[in-house]
Image (spheres, rainbow, N blue to C red):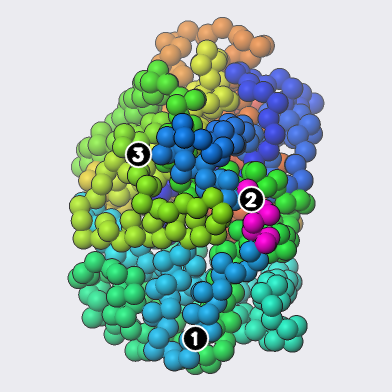
């Protein structure tokens, strides 16, 4: 459960011809009226001329930017991968990591040998009492099995870091993938068991045994799914906060010794742990008790090979892509090798690669401009909070205190993480990855019981994303997103406000969305709302929830308005704040037409066009079921149809699809 509320979830990339700095006229579909279908109007031309690349499940404005970043990162890494005494220690770290990942010949030649010591450890599990020792080892190297352990800020005392144990251990995206009984999900499960069987076969198991083992894996994971909390509930902070003593944690699991597990990972002395879902751990304990040892070993073998698959010989990479890339997300081809290795290096050593990245792409001038824009949006939010009609004075005051306390992180961290303790070997791709994960795991453990480090970044500098963290009450805008079309030097201000302005407003509004509003200025989860204000908020939020739930993602899959509520409140609020800044900048004057559009029209087109995208049907389905961000079409249309200012800007008749009589507004 990641406490960061992000702007997007971008995992893929596409090719970009060149950045736009205003309305992209070729993206428009002039045959469609903006009042009938704004998204089609803003993006129809773009969608028709930007087919999805075969190695990706989607293509959109965000992914175009990500692709440009990948090309920059590739040039950095290819240079640093060349052995030379002139390399700095940071260049050596990232260069050797990348070189090992790119060295397919060595990876093929070594086969599954790098996994053998851990396969042997799993084969040696002949007593369930020893499971905690084995899990400790597997968790250290980044194998996800049964549950996860890390550190987080204490929800009720944000200044302090606390250990957290959370439900985990599933190979499909969500517990509902194991429990829903529609034909599509049932078929996906059948293909999943097939995939597990093939992976075990690649590990050398005979066909019959692999089939039986894959069935056993499915039984274990289904057992875990049954006791896991559902996705929507995991967004409710109250439902995932159970601070227990280690003794009380132990009382949940009679067969699983936490003492042995904590010793195995060399945990610091623990007084208390946030046990997110106590029922999960009770259920896990019962599941382990009733599952025989061979089935437990099969499950762990599968989890190990799954975590390692990307850095094993090509047959493993291909099989993993065939299921997760093709079947689940609808991509056609495996992404090129360099792209996968750039992403792996960024995942493992993000703040080392980030140093080289920002040196090339981001200056102090960019930081200052961005800070000024965040200030302008903050000022708009202050005005908004001062004037929303439904708040009582007490809640309004607390909201303003919280807004003033929001801290901003722009570009890159003040202090870079030091990865020099990770042994990086040019000939050991999997070992590097495992040692990198162990470094992160131990780093997380070291924070337990300590005061929070407010300078730590949630995203790597090249990330094309932004975030708000309720417990830190801070917003982050990494260097990667501060580029055209989101942030264009010398670009059209009105268009920029609908793009970068709205996404700054989006992150600020997260502090006041359905979960963000449960946290106070200092990051503690604390109720600062009067009952009347709470009622007013919920009533307004439910309007947006219902609006989202009416949208169809694909086929018979609708969006989940409750899952998406934080994001939809943030989108609506963010655009409203950005609009206030636009009005201020125009100071009551009409403003010049540019490209044949008024400033207001360009502003809305800025918002529409950052969401231009094409998704495979598989990816649309996957997003709707697992990701809290609506697809671009509804981010664009949902927001503009709630704004009378849009109706005015495009002179829409009341009752047109984008100018309904009933509108939703929280902030
Ligand atoms: Zn967001």
Q: Which residue is mark 2?
A: 103
Q: Work out whether residue 506 can be spotted.
A: no
The N terminus lies in quadrant: bottom left
Q: Which residue is mark 3?
A: 416
Q: Position of residue 481 (x, y in %)?
A: 50, 32
Q: Is 72 rendered above or below residue 205?
A: above
Q: Is 526 rendered above or below residue 394?
A: below
Q: Nearer the viewer, residue 639 or 222?
A: 222
Quarter of image, res 507: top left
Q: Is 174 rendered above or below residue 7?
A: below
Quick check: 324 left or right of 253?
Answer: right
Q: Which residue is mark 1?
A: 124
Give the structural element (helix, strand or loop) at label 3: loop
Task: Report the Cα–Cα distance between label 1 and label 3.
Answer: 41 Å
Q: Main secondary structure of the magenta part?
A: helix
Q: Which residues are magenta?
A: 102-109
- Residue ID at (57%, 87%): 295
Q: Position of residue 340 (x, y in %)?
A: 62, 48
Q: Nearer the viewer, residue 170 or 661?
A: 170
Q: Position of residue 275 (x, y in %)?
A: 33, 71
Quick check: 205 left or right of 579?
Answer: right
């Amino acid at each position: 459960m990641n406490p960061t509320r992000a702007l997007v979830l971008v995992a893929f990339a596409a090719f970009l011809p060149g950045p736009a700095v205003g309305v992209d006229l070729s993206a428009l579909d002039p045959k469609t009226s903006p009042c009938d279908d704004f998204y089609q109007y803003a993006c129809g031309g773009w969608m028709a001329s930007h087919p999805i690349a075969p190695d990706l499940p989607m293509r959109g404005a965000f992914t175009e930017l990500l692709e440009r970043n990948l090309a920059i990162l590739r040039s950095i890494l290819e240079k640093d991968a060349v052995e030379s005494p002139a390399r700095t220690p940071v260049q050596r770290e990232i260069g050797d990591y990348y070189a090992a990942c790119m060295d397919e010949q060595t990876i093929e030649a070594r086969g599954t040998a790098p996994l053998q010591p851990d396969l042997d450890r799993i084969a040696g599990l002949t007593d369930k009492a020893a499971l905690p020792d084995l899990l400790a080892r597997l968790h250290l190297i980044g194998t996800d099995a049964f549950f996860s352990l890390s550190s987080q800020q204490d929800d009720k005392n944000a200044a302090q870091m606390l250990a957290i144990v959370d439900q985990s251990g599933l190979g499909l995206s969500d517990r509902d993938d194991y429990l829903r009984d529609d034909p599509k999900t049932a078929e996906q499960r059948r293909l999943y068991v097939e995939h597990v069987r093939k992976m075990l076969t690649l590990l050398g198991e005979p066909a019959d045994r692999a089939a039986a083992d894959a069935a056993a894996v499915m039984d274990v994971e289904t057992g875990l799914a049954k006791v896991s909390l559902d996705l929507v509930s995991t967004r409710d902070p109250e439902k995932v906060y159970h601070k227990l003593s280690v003794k009380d944690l132990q009382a949940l699991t009679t067969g699983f010794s936490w003492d042995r597990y904590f010793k195995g990972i060399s945990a610091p002395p623990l007084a208390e742990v946030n046990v997110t879902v106590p029922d999960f751990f009770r259920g896990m304990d019962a599941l382990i008790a009733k599952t025989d040892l061979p089935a437990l070993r099969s499950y762990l073998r599968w989890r190990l090979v799954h975590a390692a698959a990307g850095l094993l010989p090509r047959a493993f990479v291909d099989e993993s892509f065939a299921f997760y890339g093709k079947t689940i997300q609808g991509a056609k081809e495996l992404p090129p090798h360099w792209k996968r290795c750039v992403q792996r290096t960024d995942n493992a050593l993000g703040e080392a690669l980030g140093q080289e990245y920002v040196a090339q792409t981001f200056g102090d001038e960019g930081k200052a401009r961005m800070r000024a824009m965040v200030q302008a949006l903050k000022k708009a939010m202050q005005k908004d909070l001062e004037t929303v009609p439904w708040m009582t004075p007490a809640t309004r005051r607390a909201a303003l205190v919280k807004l003033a306390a929001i801290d901003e992180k722009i570009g890159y961290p003040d202090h870079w993480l030091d990865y020099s303790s990770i042994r990086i070997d040019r000939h050991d791709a999997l070992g590097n990855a495992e040692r990198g994960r162990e470094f992160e795991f131990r780093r997380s453990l070291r924070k337990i019981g300590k005061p929070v480090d407010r300078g730590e970044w949630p995203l790597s500098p090249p990330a094309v994303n932004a975030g708000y963290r309720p417990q830190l009450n801070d917003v982050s805008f990494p260097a990667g997103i501060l580029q055209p079309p989101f942030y264009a030097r010398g670009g059209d201000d009105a268009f920029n406000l609908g793009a970068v302005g709205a996404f700054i407003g989006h992150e600020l509004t997260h502090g006041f969305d359905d979960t963000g509003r449960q946290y106070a200025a200092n990051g503690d989860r604390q109720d600062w709302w009067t009952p009347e204000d709470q009622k007013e908020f919920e009533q307004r939020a439910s309007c947006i929830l219902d609006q989202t739930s009416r949208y169809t993602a694909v086929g018979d899959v609708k969006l989940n308005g409750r899952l998406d509520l934080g994001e939809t409140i943030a989108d609506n609020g963010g655009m409203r704040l950005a609009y206030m800044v636009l009005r201020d900048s125009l100071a009551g004057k009409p403003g010049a037409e540019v490209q044949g559009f008024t400033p207001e029209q360009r502003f809305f087109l800025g918002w529409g066009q950052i969401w231009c995208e094409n998704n495979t049907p598989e990816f649309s389905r996957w997003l709707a079921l697992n990701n809290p961000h609506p697809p671009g079409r509804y981010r664009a249309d949902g927001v503009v149809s709630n704004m009378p200012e849009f109706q005015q800007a495009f002179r829409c008749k009341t009752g047109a699809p984008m100018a309904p009589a009933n509108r939703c507004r929280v902030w």
